[in-house]
Amino acid sequence: MKLNVKGNAIVYGDNIDTDVIIPARYLNTTDKAELALHCMEDLDKTFVRRVKQGDIIVAGSNFGCGSSREHAPIAIKESGISLIIAKSFARIFYRNAINIGLPIIECPEAVENISEGDEAGMDFNKGIIYNFTTGGEYKTTPFPEFIQQIISAGGLVNAVLKGIVK
């Protein structure tokens, strides 16, 4: 088993919009570290204190709805989150996340079976999400090779600059 990511689950519900991921009052900065300091603060005041490098967000339906701001996936990625697993994503958020190299995957079965604090991980090549706390395994569609290349490069711009994708 080759894991691409492994971390503890931080669980949220449905319709987590970009305004609670990064409140509009912080959109006057492009400093990624500053954005990370305010990630989720209107939804979960404890998030920035408890998130650790590699942790995984697990959420319900329509994650990332609201505005098309790129600040939202940037704040999440910079906070240390290595993967978001949700029942579904808002379309623009999905594309913005991949463009900045933040892996996100839809898998309702995993969402239903991963609880707050569970240790989870994912093998991007096989499309398998693991819950190491319960022993559960959840099959999903693996990332296509070009998306894996974008994620590995740290985002679309880096992938183009490195000649990985055109």
Image (tube, rainbow, N blue to C red):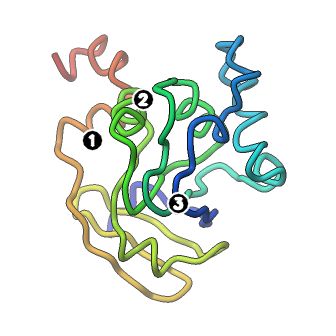
Q: Tag 3 or tag 1, which sits nearer the N-term? A: 3
Label 1: which secondary element = helix
**Mark 1 touching mark 3, by CB under 8 A?**
no
The residue beneath circle 3 is 14
Number of callouts: 3
Q: Is residue 106 above or below residue 38?
A: below
Residue that carries the numbered disc 2 in the rendered image: 154
Cα–Cα gap, marks 2 and 1 = 10 Å
Q: Amino acid at mark 2?
A: Gly
Residue at the spot of label 1: 148
- The image quadrant of residue 106 is bottom left
Residue 152 appears in view:
no
Residue 133 spot, x, y in % from top left: 56, 84
Circle 3: residue type: Asp
Image location (x, y in percent) of residue 31: 69, 16
Crowding at label 1, few (<14), some or many (≥20) Cα neighbours within 10 Å?
some
Q: Nearer the viewer, residue 155 or 72?
A: 72
**Residues at discs 2 and 1 in contact (Cβ within 8 Å):** no
The picture quadrant where one finds residue 17 is top right
Identity of the residue drawn at 65% across and 22% down: 32
Q: Which callout, 2 or 1, points at the residue further toward the start of the chain?
A: 1
Q: Nearer the viewer, residue 68 or 100?
A: 68
